[in-house]
Amino acid sequence: MQVKRSTMRASHLLRGIAMHASHAIPLPERSPLWKVFWLYGVIPSNLVWLAVAWLVDHGQLPGATLGLLVFLLGYTAWIVAAVWKAAPKAKDPRYGVMAQALTVVWAINTVLVAFFLGLQMVRAMVTG
């Protein structure tokens, strides 16, 4: 009986911490579309692509470049979902649709470029 109560208390405590943390962290679902699109999407993605371009241009660290490409694929999937959730709350519905379309096109571009650069990085790692 004592174990069950302590488990219930721990579960209640963790749920309370999670609820408090979710209100402290600005989640994309709660942010305005412009912030999700520009501050969470466009600017960070371009900074990561800049790092990838520098690494490729200087022929440095193909493993790190490959890691950044994998990170970028995951980040792109996350930002597409975030923009999709924020788009219906746009003041003008046209901005929501434009943000969704631009984000999907950006995602397709990211997948294609990451795939071909990834192949190049794997070849560089294998041939040494």
Image (cartoon, grey):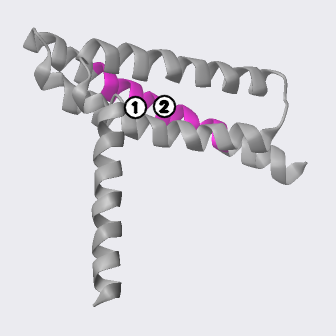
- Does 82 appear above or below 5? above
- Does 43 appear above or below 63? above
Judging by the rendered image, the residue that carries numbered circle 2 is: 110
Residue farthest to the top, as pictured: 92
Residue at horizontal 39 percent and vertical 40 percent from the top: 77
Judging by the rendered image, the residue that carries numbered circle 1 is: 107
Residue at horizontal 54 percent and vertical 18 percent from the top: 46
Magenta stretch: dominant secondary structure? helix
Instruction: Give the Cα separation between the discs numbered 2 and 1.
Output: 5 Å
Q: Position of residue 100 (x, y in %)?
A: 24, 24
Residue 115 showing in the rendered view: no
Residue at horizontal 60 percent and vertical 23 percent from the top: 49
Badge 2 local density, few (<14 within 10 Å), some, or many (20+)? some
Q: Position of residue 44 (x, y in %)?
A: 51, 21
Q: What is the magenta range?
A: 102-118
Any mark on residue 61, and which?
A: none
Residue farthest to the front, as pictured: 2
**Taking 50 as reference, is 112 left or right?**
left
Badge 1 local density, few (<14 within 10 Å), some, or many (20+)? some
In this view, the residue in front, 101 or 8, is: 8
Indicate whether residue 48 is drawn in magenta.
Answer: no
Q: Position of residue 99 (x, y in %)?
A: 25, 18
**Taking 57 as reference, is 41 left or right?**
left
Residue at horizontal 77 percent and vertical 47 percent from the top: 123
Quadrant in which residue 55 is drawn: top right
In this view, the residue in front, 92 or 103, is: 92
